[in-house]
Amino acid sequence: MEKWNGKVAVVTGASSGIGEETCKQLVEKGMIVVGFARREEKLQVLEKDLKGKLGKFYYLKVDLCSEVNILEAFDWVKNTLKSVDVLINNAGVWKNSDLLGNTNDWKQMFDTNVIGANICSREAIKIMEEIQIKDGHIININ
């Protein structure tokens, strides 16, 4: 993990579960982590929990159903931290809906779980290519 010390990771779905724990582990190992999630109050608690650790934690309120929101978030990362070395696509939503269910539920699941993850990947790759990251990683959790 020493090679990742000071490197930048973006983690989606950072406010709970696997995403939250991933943020904790990466910060404790010395990475600079930017957590994306919709629930800002949970991100604020996580930020307080991670103060004083080896790495640094930032958060942005990001709705992965909004391309504009995602683009703004990656612009912040690029302009503020100058890099993305690792992207962890962890965010996901599940609506218990079948073929007779609500179309809006399907759209929200698809927009978050597929489209949002792909937009995040595209934007991370753009930054990695621009600054010539040779060992960048994208991890998709589903």
Image (cartoon, rainbow, N blue to C red):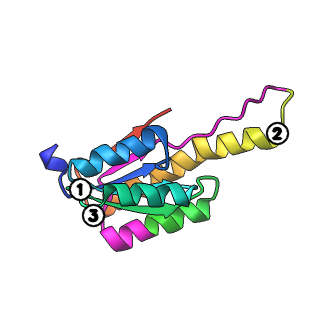
Placement of 44 over or under 12, stated as above or below: below
The residue tagged with tag 3: helix, strand or loop? loop
Amino acid type, mark 3: Ile
Quarter holding the N terminus? top left
| Residue to which mark 2 is pinned | 103
Disc 2 crowd, CA 10 A, few/some/many (<14, 14-19, 20+): few
Residue 66 disc label? none
Amino acid type, mark 2: Thr
The residue tagged with tag 2: helix, strand or loop? helix
Q: Residue at x 74, y 38 (%)?
A: 106
| Residue to which mark 3 is pinned | 131
| Residue to which mark 1 is pinned | 53
Residue 110: image quadrant is top right
Residue 9 at what x, y percent from top left? 33, 53
Of callouts 2 and 3, the N-terminal one: 2
Amino acid type, mark 1: Lys
Magenta span of residues: 76-99
Q: CA distance from mark 3 to mark 1?
A: 27 Å
